[in-house]
């Protein structure tokens, strides 16, 4: 995910880095230090706040979508049951089995990886780095014009001309869009929300940005059919407030840093793929990743260094753009 997309979008989804390395969950946001007090005791074992936090980080993907106050006792109960089972496993000799030793080695590697991330890699991304990245990309966004438009998509030119005639006769654009448009935006009166030229297919964008606010286009042909377009608004791009995107930008920078560290570690290490099928799959995956990287570079070159955003801009724009959900097939696929 590019920083441009983080700044332009009202939300940022987490992603895999280098296809296999996922940032530890706690990296997603700054967690203020708390008193590491004891909150429960299981047959003498003290469960502290720090253990609850680590457990939450570890199993967050398995938890239902619960508010923090409900999730907290949920995780504590999980820990109580885990310690009860662990204690009885020791009593019954499970700690001496090969199964336990194999699992212990796996979990130890994960624990060391996570500790290395927090102690060595995370400090490499500073507040100054995050602010610098924000300022640079925000400046680019301010130079990007964004349009808000409505659209009616039909199958033939004749249908498009009929729609134009009805609009000229005084019928409402929104009503005709809901009744006749073949696009998903019909549910929103044809409203596409705010978008940049790079987000839409070229023929559509050329027509939109040639209009004046309030004007309606002549029929526009694309691979998806015939479009009648009305331009609702034009404005320059605007970045999300720094505090709203700080954590997401940190994650982008951390993924880059992890990628740099992993590259150096691999160059200094000997990694062998023994299984022939796995080797084949790994080569195919590497080729696909390289192709995707090349495609991304071309997109960046064509858009002056800014990748097309999957969603758009400032708070006012998001309210319309997110609600519309109607760009559909017109939208250039996000990289």
Image (cartoon, rainbow, N blue to C red):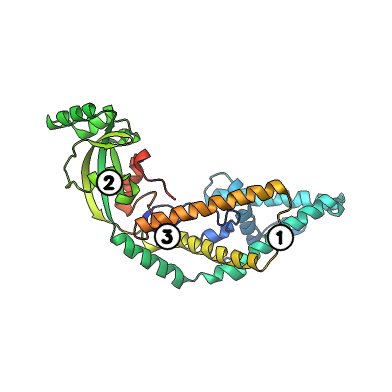
Which of the two residues, 48 or 330, is positioned nearer the viewer here? 330
- The reply to whether dot 1 and dot 2 touch (C-beta < 8 Å) is no
Question: Which residue is the site of mark 3?
Answer: 3
Q: Earlier in the sequence, mark 3 or mark 2?
A: 3
Residue 121 as seen in the image, left or right of residue 129: right
Crowdedness near tag 3: few (<14), some (14–19) or many (≥20) residues, C-alpha within 10 Å: many
> Label 2 near label 3: C-beta < 8 Å?
no
Say what secondary structure mark 1 lies in: helix
Residue 283 percent across, percent down from the top left: 62, 51
**First-in-chain label (1 vs 2):** 1
Please determine whether, in this image, residue 234 is positioned above or below residue 258.
above
Q: Is residue 73 visible?
A: no
- Around disc 1, counting alpha carbons within 10 Å, would you say few (fewer than 14), some (14 to 19), or many (20 or more)? few
Residue at 63%, 60% in the rendered image: 49
Check disc 1 and report the residue beneath it: 109
**Distance between the alpha carbons at the discs numbered 3 and 2:** 23 Å
Provide the secondary structure element on which disc 2 rests.
Answer: helix
| The disc label shown at residue 205, or none | 2
- Taking the image as shown, residue 168 lies to the left or right of residue 111, namely left
Q: Which numbered disc covers residue 331?
A: none
Tag in front: 3 or 2: 2
Q: Position of residue 82 (x, y in %)?
A: 72, 50
User: Can you give x and y, in whole percent of width and height, for residue 175 in the image?
Assistant: 23, 30
């Amino acid at each position: 995910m590019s920083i441009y997309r983080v700044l332009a979008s009202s939300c940022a989804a987490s992603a895999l880095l280098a296809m296999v390395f996922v940032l530890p969950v706690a990296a997603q946001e700054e967690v203020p230090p708390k008193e590491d007090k004891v909150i429960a005791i299981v047959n003498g074992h003290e469960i502290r706040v720090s253990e609850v936090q680590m457990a939450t980080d570890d199993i967050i993907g398995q938890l239902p979508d619960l508010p923090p106050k409900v999730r907290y006792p949920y995780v504590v109960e999980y820990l109580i049951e885990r310690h009860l089972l662990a204690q009885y496993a020791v009593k019954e000799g499970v700690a001496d089995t090969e199964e336990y030793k194999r699992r212990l080695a796996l979990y130890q590697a994960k624990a060391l990886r996570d500790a290395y991330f927090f102690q060595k890699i995370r400090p490499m991304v500073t507040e100054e780095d995050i602010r610098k990245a924000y300022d640079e990309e925000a400046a680019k966004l301010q130079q990007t014009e964004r349009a808000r438009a409505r659209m009616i998509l039909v199958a033939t030119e004749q249908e498009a001309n009929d729609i134009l005639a009805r609009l000229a006769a005084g019928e409402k654009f929104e009503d005709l869009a809901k009744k006749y448009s073949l696009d998903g935006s019909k549910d929103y009166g044809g409203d596409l929300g705010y978008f940049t030229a790079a987000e839409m297919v070229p023929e559509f964008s050329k027509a939109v940005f040639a209009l004046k606010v309030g004007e309606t286009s002549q029929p526009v042909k694309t691979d998806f059919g015939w479009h009648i377009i009305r331009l609702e608004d034009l404005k320059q791009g605007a970045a999300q407030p720094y505090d709203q995107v700080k954590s997401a930008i940190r994650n982008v920078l951390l993924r880059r840093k992890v990628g740099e560290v992993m590259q150096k570690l691999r160059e200094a290490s000997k990694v062998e793929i023994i299984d022939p099928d796995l080797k084949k799959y790994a080569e195919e995956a590497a080729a696909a990743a390289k192709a995707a990287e090349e495609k991304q570079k071309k997109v960046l070159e064509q858009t002056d260094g800014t990748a097309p955003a999957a969603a758009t801009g400032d708070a006012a724009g998001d309210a319309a753009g997110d609600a519309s959900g109607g760009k559909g097939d017109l939208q250039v696929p996000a990289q």
